[in-house]
Amino acid sequence: MLTILSNCLFLLLLSSILLVDASVRLISTNETFTSQAAAFGPKVDKFGLLAHVYVPLQNKYGCVPVDAPPPTQWIALVERGQCSFYHKVQMMQQSGAIAVIVGDPTITHYVTMSSQEDTTNVRIPGLFLTRTAYQKLAQQQPTLVLLEHDDKVPWSGMDWFYILVTVCPLVLFTLGWTVVRFTAPLLSAHPTVTDLERYLPRQHYTPLNDECPICLDVFDQQGDYRVLPCHHTFHTSCIDPWLTQYRSSCPICSKEPFPHL
Ligand SMILES: [Zn+2]
Ligand SMILES: [Zn+2]
């Protein structure tokens, strides 16, 4: 139970890390594209960001500082490649953009923009768009867009890979542990009727308890009984199937009558 609980906590933690995303809404057509937020820099907050999108004319990859377009608020739309994601965001921030959208002209799956460098100086959000959305936006620009906070997660292939390698072994371990925990008692060695006759010979006197705990019938003088080492007494016909087929312990107190078996 503890393991299952820790797995759930882990999943919750994992999803809270990955649940950072934004969508890009084209105001002119009301079309919305889902994007993946960069692993570094601030995220688009719940108020969103409304501004015109521009492709920097001097460098469509956004790898060098560019002249800011006329509006004071603008979002840079740059193409993936030529320099790192972090470098693009840095250059566009330096050029006055309030956010950067990086689009890939070829791929259709999401990529998490990350960086090994110190990214603490990044003050603007970065988003990643896949091919179709990037091409549509590039054709429409300059155009007004609203970047919105969005909790839908377009996980990338790598994210799924990390989830698989971290969560699956935990789930398998929990499953294995549960199976072993609950089936081991059933698979343990059972005494045979010969063992019972040898170690727990039938008794014919009136036992201490006056009814058989299995069938709840009152004992009579004619019946035969077995008295377990724990002193619990049962009809032979009741305790034999229990001990030989189901459990090798007393049905009342769970003590093993044959610890050596
Ligand atoms: Zn009985
Ligand atoms: Zn007992």
Image (cartoon, grey):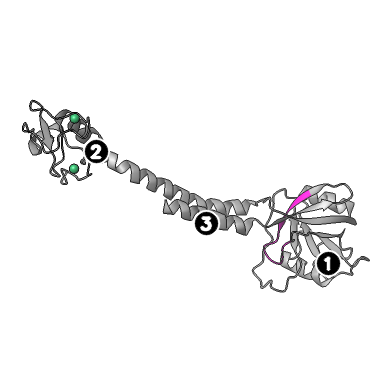
Q: Residue 121, position in %: x, y?
A: 72, 74
Q: Which residues are magenta?
A: 33-44
Give the residue at x 54% y 54%: 11
Residue, far right: 70
Quadrant hosting ligand 1:
top left
Q: Residue 78, position in %: x, y?
A: 81, 60
Q: Which amino acid is tagged 1?
A: Ala
Mark toward the start of the polypeptide (1 vs 2): 1
Residue hosting label 2? 247
Q: Say which element carries label 1.
A: loop
Give the residue at x 20% y 45%: 255
Marker disc for residue 97: 1
Q: Say which element carries label 3.
A: helix
Q: Residues within 10 Å of mark 3 (few under 14, many from 20)?
A: some
Q: Is residue 130 visible?
A: no
Which residue occupies the foreground of this view, 201 or 209?
209
Q: Which amino acid is tagged 3?
A: Phe
Q: Is residue 23 above or below residue 213?
A: below
Q: Residue 133, position in %: x, y?
A: 79, 49
- Give the quadrant of the C terminus: top left
Which residue occupies the foreground of this view, 62 or 154?
154
Asked whether, in this view, residue 1 is left or right of residue 97, the answer is: left
Report the Cα–Cα distance between label 1 and label 2.
73 Å
Residue hosting label 3? 10
Q: Residues within 10 Å of mark 1 (few under 14, many from 20)?
A: many
Q: Residue 223, position in %: x, y?
A: 10, 27
Residue, far top: 222
In the rendered structure, are the residues bearing label 1 and label 2 in contact, judged by CB atoms less than 8 Å apart? no
Q: Which amino acid is tagged 2?
A: Arg
